[in-house]
Image: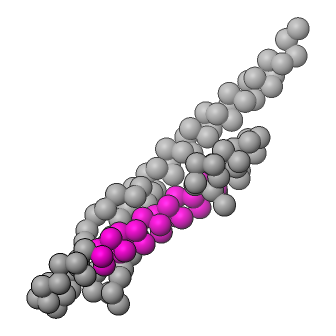
Amino acid sequence: MFKGLGNLGSMMKQAQEMQGRMKEVQQRLESMRVQGSAGGGMVTVECSGQQKILSCRIDPVLVQSGDAEMIEELTVAAVNQALDKAKETAAEEMGRVAGDMNIPGLEDAMSKLGIGG
């Protein structure tokens, strides 16, 4: 009658370990910095591993050109590149944690959310 309780206890322990590791991952991602750039470096965007934009630098030469459309396009491209890098970084960090835990279906669930392989 109580055979499954051992497995339940093991699963609970794994869940607690995973929660602790996830907190560590979130802290590491918060401190990580990635950059995206466009226009040969004329626009550079920095974001955290948590996909938060931290800074945006636009070369003064580009600003002086007065080409608002170009500035907008390069800014969007640089932001998207930075966010893609942040997403890849987060997926790698999550993969390290998940790989150690051997939780059935986790890899499939992460890929459906767009954060895995």
Residue 103 on image: x %, y %: 73, 41
Q: Quadrant of the C terminus?
A: bottom right
Q: Is residue 86 left or right of residue 88?
A: left
Residue 21 on image: x %, y %: 57, 45
Q: Is residue 31 left or right of residue 91?
A: left
Verify whether residue 83 appears in magenta: yes
In the rendered picture of this protein, how many numbered marks are placed on residues? 0
Q: Is residue 73 left or right of residue 90?
A: left
Q: Residue at x 58, y 48 (%)?
A: 113
Q: Main secondary structure of the magenta part?
A: helix
Q: Quadrant of the N terminus?
A: top right
Q: Residue at x 71, y 48 (%)?
A: 108
Q: Residue at x 40, y 68 (%)?
A: 80
Q: Quadrant of residue 35?
A: bottom left
Residue 49 on image: x %, y %: 43, 60
Residue 27 on image: x %, y %: 43, 51
Verify whether residue 39 appears in magenta: no
Task: Tell me the magenta residue range.
Answer: 73-97
> Does the image show residue 86?
yes
Q: Is residue 42 above or below residue 112?
A: below
Give the colour scheme shown: one colour
Please tell me which residue lies in front, 99 or 16.
99
Residue furthest toward the top? 1
> Does the image show residue 44?
no
Please tell me which residue lies in front, 112 or 56.
112
